[in-house]
Amino acid sequence: MDGALRQDFINIVKDFTSMASIYLSDDVEKAIRTIAEEETFPMAKTMYDCILKDLSLAAELHRPICQDTGVIQYFADVGTGFPYMDDIGDVLRTAAIAATLETPLRPNVVEPLGEHNTGNNAGYGAPYIEYDLVPNSTDLRLRMYMAGGGCSLPGRSKVLMPLEGVEGVKNFVYRTIVDWGVNACPPLCIGIGLGTCAATSAMLSKKALLRPIGTHSEYPEVAKLEDEIRDGLNSIGIAPLGFGGSRSVLSVNIEAAAHHPATLGVGITTGCWATRRGEIVIHKDLSYDIISHTRSMEA
């Protein structure tokens, strides 16, 4: 990859990363505005007024929505015909550093155990990059997520006894959010993963969180569980920002995989009201389509 093309690639990812820190994705902003309009609790309405003012100021001043811009994570679905496959890792790392310096994003990455801040949001394993290969495609589908401190705190993964079943899943999710959800700046986006072990359920929960609000599992039983857990969490009344209100979650998404009959792994990943994620498709000629942020592009 020659120098000019490499710089173009870096700039695309840098600008995309920066944009996702300043503007909410279309689905998250729509959900926030909808529940703000429907809210009846006086303190909750005040909190939503503050949230909406924050969104307006972030766009006006071209500054991140929240001071905690998280640790950057990229999820790359790479077409086997994408011509710059070998360059993706280096480009994403360089773009994350550039976005940190130019946006600017708060440097959050500290070295393992030593806690020394690297100053540029890059370090061993950071930004986190996960790859999936897509046969018969020449595109790079890139999803980005900013994992903030507060919204990462409720993250849990546990293997249930098989007889605990659906009720065990619901109880684990409810207990986790009741105990920890207020720390994650609700109303929350909830990703739940169901699999064989703690590792697979945790990974699936992150993939669930990356799904747009309003989408449902392709499995009818799982889609029904999404609605049941959403309604249950909304009844606990912690949102927004823990001051009480009628809605505690923006969404509940579940990704489920076939699992061992003797175990049922459950993972939870939470996103705050300012869940910052984005999706872009980069084509082989480096033209691109931003999927997640059509409103901010129009603005």
Image (cartoon, rainbow, N blue to C red):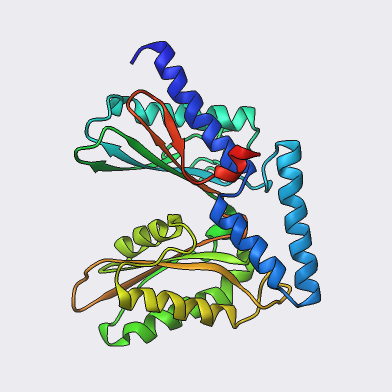
Question: Residue 281 falls in which quadrant of the image?
Answer: top left
Question: Residue 37 falls in which quadrant of the image?
Answer: bottom right
Question: Relative to residue 35, is residue 141 depicted above or below?
Answer: above
Residue 117 shows up from this direction: no
Q: Percent from the top left, x then y, of residue 194?
A: 32, 69
Question: Relative to residue 188, is residue 277 depicted above or below?
Answer: above
Q: Residue at x 32, y 78 (%)?
A: 221
Which quadrant would the N terminus be assigned to in this image? top left
Seen from the viewer's position, the closer of residues 99 and 62 is 62
Question: Relative to residue 81, is residue 40 depicted above or below?
Answer: below
Q: Percent from the top left, x then y, of residue 263?
A: 24, 76
Seen from the viewer's position, the closer of residues 64 and 139 is 139
Q: Is residue 36 left or right of residue 137?
A: right
- How many marks the image carries: the answer is 0
Q: Is residue 195 left or right of residue 36?
A: left
Q: Residue at x 43, y 31 (%)?
A: 288
Q: Is residue 180 left or right of residue 76?
A: right
Question: Residue 239 falls in which quadrant of the image?
Answer: bottom right
Furthest toward the top, the residue is: 3
Q: Percent from the top left, x then y, of residue 124?
A: 43, 37
Which quadrant would the C terminus be assigned to in this image? top right
Q: Percent from the top left, x then y, of residue 285?
A: 35, 23
Residue 87 shows up from this direction: yes
Q: Residue at x 46, y 18 (%)?
A: 7
